[in-house]
Image (spheres, helix red, strand yellow):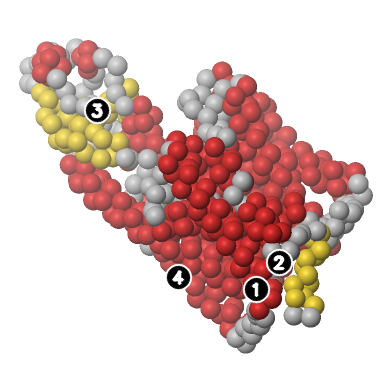
Amino acid sequence: MLETIALLFPSAFFSVVRKALGRESEHPLFEWAISVVAVNVVALATVCYVFGHPVGVGQLLNQSTVFWMKYVLLSSGLSSSAGLLSVWAEKNVTLSITPPNISSSSLRVAAIVISVAFASLQLIRIFNYDFWWDESFSVNLARMSLQDMLNRTASDVHPPLYYLILMTAVSLLGDTGWVYNFVSLIPYIATIVLALTIVWKQFGGSAAMVFVACTTFMNSALRYSLEVRMYSWAALFMLIAYLSLFQILRKDRALDWTVFCLASLAASYTHYYALLLVAFLYCGIIVLALIHRVNGKRVILSCVATAAGYAPWLTVLFGTFKRTSESFWMTSIPTFEEAVRWLFDIGNGAGGTSTLIIAAFVLGLVLTVSVRTSLLRVSRAERRWVVNVSGGHAEMDATTIWILVGAGSVLAVILTGLVVSELVRPLFTLRYLYPAAVLVWLLLGVFVSQFSARRTIALVLVLLMLHAGIPAYLELVKQDEEIQQQQSQTINELSDIKEGDLLFSDDQSLYLAILEAYFPGTEVQRLDDISILSQQSEKCLWLILSSDLSEEQIEEIASSGYETIEVCHGGDLGRATIHAYRLDAVKGGDTQ
């Protein structure tokens, strides 16, 4: 409640001051709404960048009365000052801007050079051999036969297409660490190419470069464009489907419908939340068919083709939902605010840049839809800007419909994940939104392209992202190097482990995935009780544990006929801390 008052109330001073000076608005509600966004953007920027608060502004507004009063005073002062300044400017200022004449070809070349530089930042990170639990699971599936992989995936919680792509790449390029990372980087490179070609052609260079910056420096992009999981591929397929939908709404070509169907199917076979996003896109298309905005026959054909293509996996999907609804590893549910902030999360700071980008997205959505539907008209006559707000019937063109379908589908995915998690059990984590995040970043670029000052706005946004994203990237590289050094030392200490050895562990992430990924050909078992060691054969035994052995456990192992030799203390393997022991059979000892 306090947060809402602080964000909405002070902006009213803009209209109050203007009215007191004889400038009463014909559309006070619209004027107030615009001032709410503008005043809070400036206030948040001041709070985050000038005063550098370490926690979220929303949290401070609700928890600190002193901070609340200061924020209200700051916003009220900004709002009143803006009102005074606007009246003075209307009487005394004439603004004329002549932008530099830069050819489109020069801009394209510059954009390509910048994009290659961005891609290079990611490319140099593919040589880190550091696979945590989920990544190790991907590595293990890629080493299986096709039938074993399908069987294992069917009992897991993700569909199989990504694992099939990974298997193919490993078989062609070899079973080495960089190959696994490079497979996840391919969609990022493809996204850059799509941005510099299709996005540039349809929406201009400003949209393309904002999109490229988002897909490079957003925190989720820094992580999932390299992680050995399916998220980057699901995002690429969703991007292709959404761009195809734009062409469908404009041209209704059979080729675009075909690409849309294939990309939608590929996304659905890559991640179940991508399937959900596809479903909502189709809901939007069906609604458009009902109001005769798209070809009804092609909508039916597309729905049937997509459903038929996914039919072989439907029984697995239902089984997965039934199994996860009864038991799943998740225990917490994110909030709606956390989900929205995750989409725009960037940098290592208190979220100031993220807040500004969220505000830019919301303002861009409102203004773009308002202008394109003629609800809002902005023109310039006799050296004055003229703003007309219409309350009549809104006519929507193909671009507006495409924007609303995309934004609405992302919102629907978030709400569905939250509602199902509340009603059934937690089944939604923020990283599942990555395929949707790419659509949101594309829309941000599209909103920028709708304004006459698009190049200036794009430059400001890109610089903001560089300001927040480059330090986050450098910190991530530093962390990668530290982890790699620690892990290299650990692997060196475990270099005596050979194929056929028997590895025991009490850590779930280790015995379910990580040990198998790092030491292929070994046999891995769960260690529930030390007494199980007395039942072992002549295989070389290893204990890879989450903590040190106690003196009692060492004595119990000795009574089973083994000498305990510690080979690694507090090492790092797959981001799990380990304590490793080799068990040597004592000559003449009882190992029966």
Q: Percent position (x, y) of residue 371?
A: 78, 62
Using the numbered discs, state the Cα–Cα distance from disc 1 to disc 3 in whole angstroms. 71 Å
> Which type of secondary structure does the marked residue at label 2 adopt?
loop
Using the numbered discs, state the Cα–Cα distance from disc 4 to disc 1 in whole angstroms. 42 Å
- Earlier sequence position, callout 1 versus callout 3: 1
- Earlier sequence position, callout 4 versus callout 1: 1
> Which type of secondary structure does the marked residue at label 1 adopt?
helix
Using the numbered discs, state the Cα–Cα distance from disc 2 to disc 4 in whole angstroms. 27 Å
Residue at left 85%, top 47%? 288
> Which type of secondary structure does the marked residue at label 3 adopt?
strand
Residue receiving disc 3: 545
Residue receiving disc 4: 117
- Earlier sequence position, callout 3 versus callout 4: 4
Using the numbered discs, state the Cα–Cα distance from disc 2 to disc 1 in whole angstroms. 25 Å
Residue 344 makes an appearance in the image? yes
Q: Percent position (x, y) of residue 437?
A: 58, 49
Residue receiving disc 2: 450
Residue at left 79%, top 54%? 401
Which label was assigned to residue 89? Answer: 1
Q: Percent position (x, y) of residue 5?
A: 59, 41
- Earlier sequence position, callout 2 versus callout 1: 1
Is the residue under label 3 in contact with that under label 1 (CB below 8 Å)? no
* Residue 144 horizontal side relative to residue 317, left or right: left
Badge 3 crowding class, 10 Å Cα cut-off, few under 14, some 14 to 19, many 20 or more, is many
* Residue 546 horizontal side relative to residue 583, left or right: right
